[in-house]
């Protein structure tokens, strides 16, 4: 009895130590993650979509979005209960990640408790540098894994635990509510488990159908044609060519724009090769990891455990997202699952050769961490370690933009200053109920924009359907973008991403009509090194820079607005002739004159 108590005591200490280590790995970077710079398009679109929906706008009907309704509805409910803010949105993102990590732990612990703890730690280590953005893929994947975990646990009892089957069905429904493109990833592994279990299948299908009721509301409010175009046609046929990257990635050149920026700014990396080789090496490392996982269900020594087979099938089906866009963000989004499963997979392969499972799990995990850290030092290893540091350097204050009672964190003081100047100018001069358009300086290339400006200007409504802009969708002839620009009272044009280039069709110029509207219907109010603020000319007043000499000037004075001088000198903010110089003085009476 004393020996048993001693053994149990040792086991309890080991489990407690493992839990403490994983808890520290998760909690220590959280202060930094909550203060990470906001991503102007991805995070900006999430918080603006939710805020608009809170005030009655409808996804896919009033604004473009390619994701499922829960990507908008969940933060909308959170904003209604609390308030619209990046802090609330990132708390949701943390909850999504908790579901994902918890589901992986639940799935792996039946094979190896040590492997489950190590797997949870590897998954978090991989995905943490992505930040806490409430991204639809993290929510969808997390609940898809949770659905599989609940179904697996339900079928371990005879008869099946109906409560867990219900939890599984609802979890699958939530996953599809975030990402309908996960339907195959959800259905096939579930079928592996419930095949020939009709009573379980009926309950599972019924609860999943109940969980998908938000889609009925979505269908009724948005309309089937809008949903079909946004969630199916645009992502499958119009978006991919402008976002795809070469597979496999090159060892000498990085295709993804933002990784190239990282290559220029991460001069302080500890060890490791150039960033292109890190991206390529990590790509091949993850494929090797996937091959090891798949090997556990192939060949003479394969596992016959349906529970493990279902999980391996899910892991294999994630390869489509992995190859969809060969950049490090997609590697993190999928690789966190593969890396978490790897130590247990190695244990499965070596167990029949007499190797002790706990020792194999620990050794394989250590080797995996070493190889991953050496192959992608900056992007995988150092990226996590940097999260343990304060978001702002010692003795300095993190740059933020605070306008109209709303705040976003940034990492560059210069950009924060100019962004604040542009947003404050619009806030000062605009009237409640007017409209705003934000886009890149040259609207033929809608590769990236900053919809977070819309969120900073709650007194204005967006003039465009394309809050988030993408090549092949918003810049094509027939998109309606030119008319939407023309409806705006105020325009903010951004130069921040004017050098955006990738080896895909995003470099092909699109419809020039929006630029023509900017040239002839708007005058600039102020310009900074990154942004230009323009206002719409009054009805009946247009200018034609091509027909003006540099000495010609059109001065337009609007009631309670600044006088805008439109000259023939092309603006910095475009590759085409654009209206420049502004005199920011206020005039009470409307007038128009040519000098």
Image (tube, grey):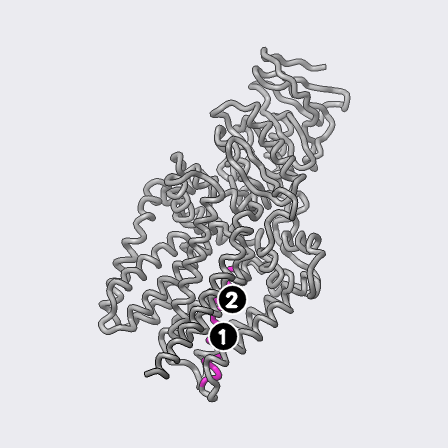
The residue at 48%/54% (across/down) is: 236
Q: In this view of the protein, can residue 149 be seen by the observer?
A: yes
Q: In this view of the protein, can residue 483 be seen by the observer?
A: no
Q: Is the residue 114 above or below the residue 572 in the image?
A: below
Residue extent of the magenta highlight? 333-351
- Which x, y percent locates residue 174? 36, 54
Q: Is the residue 490 above or below the residue 330 in the image?
A: above
Q: CA distance from mark 1 to mark 2?
A: 10 Å
The residue at 31%/47% (across/down) is: 216
- The answer to whether residue 136 is left or right of residue 152 is right
Which residue is the site of mark 2?
122
Which residue is the site of mark 1?
343
In front of the other: 530 or 449: 530
| Residue extending farthest front | 2
Q: Please tell me whether mark 1 sits on a helix, a strand or a loop.
A: helix
**Mark 1: few/some/many CA within 10 Å (<14, 14-19, 20+):** many
Q: Is the residue 522 above or below the residue 341 in the image?
A: above
In front of the other: 334 or 67: 334
* Magenta residue check for 347: yes
- The majority secondary structure of the magenta stretch comes to helix
Q: Are marks 1 and 2 in contact (CB under 8 Å)?
A: yes
């Amino acid at each position: 009895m004393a020996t048993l108590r001693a053994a149990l005591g040792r086991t309890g200490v080991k489990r407690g130590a493992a839990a403490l280590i994983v808890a520290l790995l998760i909690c220590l970077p959280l202060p930094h993650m909550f203060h990470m710079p906001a991503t102007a398009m991805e995070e900006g679109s999430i918080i603006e979509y939710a805020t608009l929906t809170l005030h009655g706008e409808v996804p896919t009907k009033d604004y473009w979005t390619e994701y499922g309704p829960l990507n908008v509805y969940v933060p909308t409910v959170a904003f209604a209960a609390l308030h619209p803010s990046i802090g609330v949105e990132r708390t949701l993102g943390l909850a999504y990640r908790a579901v994902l990590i918890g589901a992986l732990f639940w799935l792996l612990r039946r094979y190896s408790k040590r492997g489950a703890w190590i797997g949870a730690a590897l998954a978090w280590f991989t995905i943490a540098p992505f930040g806490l953005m409430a991204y639809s893929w993290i929510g969808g994947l997390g609940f898809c894994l949770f659905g599989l975990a609940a179904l697996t646990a339900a079928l371990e009892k005879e008869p099946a635990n109906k409560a867990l089957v219900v939890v599984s069905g609802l979890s699958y429904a939530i996953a599809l509510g975030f990402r309908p493109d996960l339907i195959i990833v959800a259905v096939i592994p579930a079928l592996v488990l419930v095949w020939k279990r009709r009573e379980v299948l009926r309950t599972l299908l019924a609860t999943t159908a109940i969980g998908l009721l938000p889609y009925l509301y979505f269908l009724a409010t948005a309309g089937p044609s809008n949903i079909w175009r946004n969630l199916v046609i645009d992502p499958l046929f119009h978006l991919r060519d402008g976002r795809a990257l070469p597979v496999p990635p090159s060892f000498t050149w990085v295709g993804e724009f933002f990784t190239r920026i990282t290559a220029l700014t991460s001069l302080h990396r500890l060890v490791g090769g150039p960033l292109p080789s890190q991206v390529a090496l990590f790509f091949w490392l993850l494929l090797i990891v996937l091959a090891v996982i798949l090997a556990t269900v192939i060949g003479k020594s394969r596992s016959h455990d349906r529970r493990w087979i279902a999980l391996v099938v899910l892991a294999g089906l994630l390869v489509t997202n992995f190859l969809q866009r060969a950049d490090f963000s997609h590697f993190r989004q999928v690789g966190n699952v593969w890396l978490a499963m790897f130590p247990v997979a190695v244990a499965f392969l070596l167990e029949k050769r007499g190797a002790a499972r706990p020792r194999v799990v620990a050794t394989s995990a250590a080797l995996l961490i070493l190889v991953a850290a050496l192959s992608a030092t900056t992007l995988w290893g150092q990226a996590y370690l940097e999260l343990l540091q304060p978001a702002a350097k010692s003795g300095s204050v993190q740059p933020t933009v605070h306008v109209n009672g709303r705040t976003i964190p940034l990492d560059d003081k210069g950009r924060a200053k100019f962004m604040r100047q542009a947003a404050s100018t619009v806030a000062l001069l605009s009237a409640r109920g007017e409209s705003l358009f934000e886009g890149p300086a040259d609207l033929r290339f809608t590769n990236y924009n900053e919809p977070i400006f819309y969120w900073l200007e709650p007194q204005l409504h967006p003039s465009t359907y394309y809050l988030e802009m993408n090549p092949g969708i918003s810049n094509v002839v027939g998109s309606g973008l030119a008319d939407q620009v023309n409806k705006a009272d105020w325009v903010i044009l951004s130069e921040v991403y004017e050098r955006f280039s990738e080896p895909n069709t995003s470099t092909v110029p699109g419809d020039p009509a929006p630029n023509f509207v900017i040239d002839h219907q708007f005058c600039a109010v102020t310009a900074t090194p990154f942004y230009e603020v323009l206002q719409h000319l009054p009805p009946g007043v247009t200018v034609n820079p091509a027909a003006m000499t540099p000495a010609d000037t059109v001065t337009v004075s609007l009631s309670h607005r600044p006088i805008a001088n439109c000259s023939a000198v092309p603006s910095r903010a475009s590759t085409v002739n654009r209206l420049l110089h502004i005199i920011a003085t206020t005039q009470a009476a409307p007038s128009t004159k040519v000098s």
